Image (cartoon, grey):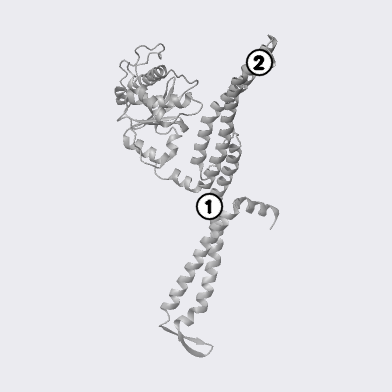
Amino acid sequence: MNAGNRRRLKNYFIKKRLQTNFILKFCLLVILACAIMSALVYLLSEKTTTTSFEGLRLTVKSTADFILPTLILSSLVAIILISLATVAVFLLITHRIAGPLHRLETDLAEIAKGDLTKDIHLRKKDEFKILAAIINSLLRNLRNPISVSRTRLNELESDIAALKAGLRAKGTSEDEAEQIVRPLRKKAEQIKNIFLFFKISSIVIFFAFMSCLPAAQADVTDGVPPAELISNEGWTITKSIFCTLYFRYDVDIGAVNDRLDTYKVDYGLLEKPPRPGEGDKEKISYKFDLIFYKVQELLDMRPKDLHLNVRIYRDQKDLDRVYMEIFDQENKFIAYYIFKINTLFASEAKISANVMAHEIAHCIVDHYFSVIPPKKVAEMIAQYADAHLRD
């Protein structure tokens, strides 16, 4: 075998253990099927006789004994030919699984080390493309806030050093200056520890993910495809100051506008969104921004650069289906917000300003604190926003 052929075969044997086990098990099934078929033919023909001329002699034999050599030979030939065909076909099939699986392992290993700039690129015909797209979407949502936080941390450390130098220039002793800046240094160290925790968590998530990757792929492709969360097909899209709103193709946008009653929501607001246009989509965008301004004022929390994705479905059963797909458990909420994908899910049937205020409060709380508060605390804050929306 020349070097080119060896290299080509090596390319197809990316994950040797996985692919070899796959091929061997199928070949064993082929051998077992041929053996069972031959045995059945032999047993069924045992009670019959066959006559033949061997040379000039007339021979009478049991049909089973007569066909046995031919049966063995044909079975061996069939096993060899089918096994060779199996190797070729399954190499092609498993290559589309083993190749992207190897790529996922390699790229996720880099991501687990803290490199969030990497995207996972798979070929057009590879498997796991939906899974890779979801991971890429998650990384894009993480990149900007973490990058900004690292920049702010560097600025904070520079400011601490400048503050200490300024104090020393004014005649403050080294010990006194250090005592003044020590609380700030402690805060900076806490932020560093959060970044370290994130890196360690990424490594843990990576190994946990790789240990259940085949199962994860089954979850992704069964039932409702998660592609609907990363694809714009079948959605009507509009943007506001705080939101990107996705209306599924079967949603009555006019009905959504009617159900979002923002009466008295703007009372007492110091800052309001620009007045909306005449279309239903523009009015809905205005109402979502209005709710955002009101909830931020109620909670006195204003996270920077906050922008939320809102997916609006037609019926509650659609929300239940998506929730089951993501969490593999029954949905008990009329709307819900998922921090990890920064998305609020609601339905045309049960949408209202108060329900949206509740979920938007969850979004604001999760983005405001560097460490997300306990669920019960966050729920109490969200209920407060809901109860006082029209105050």
For residue 243, side relative to residue 92 (left or right): left
**In which quadrant will I find the N terminus?**
bottom right
Note whether residue 181 is visible: yes
How far from the left and from the top, in percent, is residue 326?
42, 39
Identify the mark at residue 177; answer none if there is no mark: 2
Q: Position of residue 43 (x, y in %)?
A: 43, 78
Q: Give the residue furthest to the top.
A: 170
Find residue 282 and report its horizontal and vertical position in percent: 37, 19
Residue under the point 45% across and 43% down:
220
Mark 1 secondary-structure assignment: helix
Label 1 close to label 2 by CB (< 8 Å) = no
**Which label sits on residue 93?**
1
Secondary element at tag 2: helix
Residue in front for this viewpoint, 57 or 339: 339
Q: Does 12 sit above or below residue 50?
A: above
Task: Nearest to the eye among marks 1 and 2: give it.
Answer: 2
In the visual, does 223 lie left or right of 368? left
Place of residue 103 in the rendered image (x, y in percent of width and height, measured from the top left): 58, 43
Toward the viewer: 374 or 153? Answer: 374
Image quarter of residue 391: top left
- Mark 1 → mark 2, Cα distance in angstroms: 67 Å
Q: Residues within 10 Å of mark 2 (few under 14, many from 20)?
A: some
Q: Residue at x 48, y 88 (%)?
A: 59
Looking at the picture, which amino acid does disc 1 mark? Ile
Neighbour class for label 1 at 10 Å: few (<14), some, many (≥20)? some
In this view of the protein, can residue 120 be seen by the observer? no
- Relative depth, front residue between 376 and 330: 376
Q: Amino acid at mark 2?
A: Ala
